[in-house]
């Protein structure tokens, strides 16, 4: 029973290795986003996360035994060759642009954060934000009941 | 639609409406940068929004006549080419989004100089136009990957718009960064889902995907795709436990941003959820049913209570409104999860009605913010006397949040209760009514401070230019109007719901 499952997993690993690679890369990126406190590391993790999806798309475009989808001379389709699917590549070209834009925007936000807060560590940022928040609330408390006359 | 004579025949202006809907704001955005001057950019923005609004109304009229308008981009017939497809559901929401964009652009006349730094105003308007075209694109497109691209166009410009609050409060920067991280994770999840669907079907046209997954037995690839798409769009639409970016983004962003986002951005993400549920995955009713009843419905009810409760404990108008938005999204998802025509009607009507009322509330909050420098409860004491016009309008919006008869919010809650009764689940009816009591609590708290607390001074101080005044009262009037006259909203929503449920019952 266990042997069966193991051999199933083995064949799955062997035949779908590219998917495992994609999952591992994706989870690595996702883990960096969640676990790292440094905002730049977060952006790098996010990038890795997105890139893994690009690899996934490109891998599903591959047709077994297929050649690159480039038409031979005179723009005639060769009836005997199998072509890989070019569409995922085109899609990913768009997704890469989106990824670049996201990274650029994220990094520029980090620069602005560094200018105003003096730090890019998430824990410090949270601490500063909490202080601002509690200062606002202390003012509220000092004024006492909202309905008291002034 | 695929017949060649339609493609080759010369098309009139009216045939190109679907693409023009997206194209006008998109093409006017770079014009803002080119002209460079902020006054000119503002007029460009207003005219682009006005054009988009007119086109959305024309499209709605066309949909009424033809039923479904399908537009082939570049003359490539679907499913090979990208298809823009307008039916009752998105025609109705196109009117909401472009109408709100138009109102926000007029609101910007009186408030932009006070909210946004002078040298950034032109670029802010550019982002605003890009955001509009992205949202309109999400609504109108029939292509799954195209939807992702438009979603990211709107989200990227939204991050910039949120970060513009940094000149008033630096926390806008961290809010925008959090939103960027969460939003990108959401979008990437969505793209993974689309990838799985593409791997399973080999097509990206949503209606074609629906056709092709029809014959399949429950298939692991399709189930995984569904899960990824739902979580991804749930992040964008602030589905309850995924909502953490929303309160920060709404409360620290400049108020024009908050007005526009609160009334459109999450609504569009929820539209995408509805579209995928009922136009793509409807051929797997058992999967849908189990997800909607076991996950979406409890989360929706949880959102109504938890976010409503948190809203009560806020001491800042903007944050209170943001949390109340999360709780109102709960009502919409509850309506969706009934999987009945009337439930879906309630959800779509609430998308519209809540959009209007929340825009009204945020516009009033913006005026309060500009008059007093903040929107803390301690600063709005006795506002009823100091700012009579704004306070009165705020009250109307608040009543609509609760769902008092005569306001727009009542109509959608009434339909929602009807849907719950139709299902025979009295517990849910009780949940809707009790959560409305929570809404009464947080709205009443503000009303009490506004009207019954003594204010430090009695001078009237109303930061209300003619344009802001106009917007406040247009929104207040429409909140009441759509509460009394339901022929427009309910009629269109029920038509949209009927169309979606037809797909669904055919499968069953």
Image (tube, coloured by chain):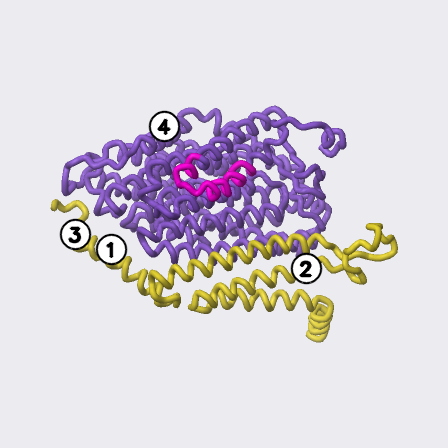
Image quadrant occupied by the C terminus of chain B: top right
Q: Earlier in the sequence, mark 1 or mark 3?
A: 1
Among the 4 quarters of the image, the one containing residue B46: top left
Identify the residue under disc 3: A143
CA distance separating discs 2 and 4: 53 Å
Describe residue A22's horizontal placement relative to residue B387 as left or right: right
Identify the residue under disc 4: B477
* Magenta residues, start to end: B22-43
Q: Earlier in the sequence, mark 2 or mark 3?
A: 2
x, y percent for residue B106: 39, 34
Identify the residue under disc 1: A136
From the viewer's side, name the closer residue of B278 and B16.
B16
x, y percent for residue B369: 28, 43
Disc 2 with disc 1 on a shared chain: yes
On the question of residue A21 being in view, the answer is yes
x, y percent for residue B323: 37, 48
Letter of the chain that mark 3 sits on in the rendering: A
Q: Examine the structure image and report whether residue B26 is included in the region drawn in magenta.
A: yes
Disc 1 with disc 3 on a shared chain: yes
10 Å crowding of disc 1: few (<14), some (14-19), many (20+): some
Q: Nearer the viewer, mark 2 or mark 3?
A: 2
Say which chain is yellow. A
On the question of residue B334 being in view, the answer is no
Residue drawn 24% across the image and 55% down it: A136
């Amino acid at each position: 029973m266990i042997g069966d499952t193991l051999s199933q997993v083995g064949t799955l690993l062997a035949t779908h290795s590219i998917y495992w690679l994609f999952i591992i890369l994706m989870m690595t990126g996702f883990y960096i986003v969640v676990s790292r406190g440094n905002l730049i590391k977060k952006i790098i993790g996010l990038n890795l996360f997105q890139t893994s999806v690009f690899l996934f798309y490109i891998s599903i475009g591959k047709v077994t035994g297929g050649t690159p989808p480039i038409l031979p001379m005179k723009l005639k389709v060769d009836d005997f060759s199998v072509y890989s699917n070019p569409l995922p590549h085109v899609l990913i070209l768009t997704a890469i642009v989106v990824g670049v834009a996201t990274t650029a925007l994220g990094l520029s936000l980090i620069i602005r954060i560094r200018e105003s807060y003096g730090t890019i560590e998430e824990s410090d940022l949270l601490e500063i934000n909490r202080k601002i928040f509690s200062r606002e609330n202390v003012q509220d408390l000092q004024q006492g009941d909202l309905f008291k006359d002034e | 639609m695929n017949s060649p004579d339609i493609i080759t025949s010369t098309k009139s202006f009216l045939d190109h409406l679907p693409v023009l809907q997206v194209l006008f704001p998109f093409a006017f955005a770079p014009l803002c940068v080119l002209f460079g001057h902020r006054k000119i950019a503002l007029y460009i923005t207003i005219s682009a929004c006005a054009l988009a609004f007119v086109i959305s109304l024309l499209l709605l009229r066309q949909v009424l006549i033809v039923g479904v308008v399908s537009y082939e981009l570049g003359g490539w017939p679907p499913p090979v080419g990208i298809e823009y497809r307008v039916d009752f559901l998105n025609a109705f929401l196109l009117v909401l989004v472009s109408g709100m964009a138009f109102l926000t652009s007029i609101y910007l006349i009186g408030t932009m100089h006070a909210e946004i730094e002078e040298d950034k105003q032109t670029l802010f308007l550019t982002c605003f136009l890009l955001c509009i075209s992205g949202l309109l694109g999400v609504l109108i497109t029939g292509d799954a990957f195209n939807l992702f691209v438009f979603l990211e166009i709107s989200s990227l410009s939204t991050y910039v718009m949120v970060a513009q609050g940094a000149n008033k409060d630096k926390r806008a920067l961290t809010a925008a960064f959090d939103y960027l991280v969460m939003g990108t994770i959401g979008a990437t999840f969505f793209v993974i889902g689309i990838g799985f669907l593409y791997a399973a079907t080999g097509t990206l046209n949503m209606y074609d995907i629906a056709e092709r997954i029809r014959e399949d037995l429950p298939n692991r690839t399709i189930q995984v795709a569904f899960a990824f798409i739902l979580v991804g769009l749930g992040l964008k639409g602030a589905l309850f436990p995924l909502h953490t970016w929303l309160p920060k983004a709404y409360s620290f962003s400049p108020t024009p941003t908050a007005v526009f986002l609160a009334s459109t951005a999450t609504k569009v993400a929820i539209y995408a959820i509805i579209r995928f549920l009922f136009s793509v995955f409807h051929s797997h009713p058992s999967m849908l049913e189990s997800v909607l009843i076991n996950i979406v419905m409890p989360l929706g009810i949880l959102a109504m209570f938890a976010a409503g409760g948190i809203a009560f404990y806020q001491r800042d108008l903007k944050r209170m409104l943001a949390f109340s938005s999360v709780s109102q999204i709960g009502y919409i998802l509850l309506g969706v999860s009934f999987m009945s025509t009337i439930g879906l009607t309630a959800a779509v009507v609430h998308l519209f009605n809540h959009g209007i009322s929340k825009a009204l509330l945020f516009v009033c909050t913006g005026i309060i913010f500009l008059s007093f420098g903040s929107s803390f409860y301690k600063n709005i004491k006795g506002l009823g006397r100091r700012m009579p016009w704004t306070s009165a309008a705020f009250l109307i919006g608040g009543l609509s949040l609760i769902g008092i008869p005569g306001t727009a919010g009542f109509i959608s809650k009434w339909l929602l209760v009807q849907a719950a009764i139709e299902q025979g689940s009295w517990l849910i009816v009780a949940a809707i009514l009790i959560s409305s009591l929570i809404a009464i609590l947080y709205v009443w708290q503000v009303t009490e401070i506004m009207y019954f607390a003594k204010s430090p001074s009695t001078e009237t101080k109303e930061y209300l230019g003619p344009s802001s005044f106009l917007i406040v009262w247009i929104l207040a009037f429409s909140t009441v109007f759509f509460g009394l006259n339901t022929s427009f909203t309910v009629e269109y929503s029920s038509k949209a719901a009927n169309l979606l449920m037809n797909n669904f019952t055919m499968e069953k």
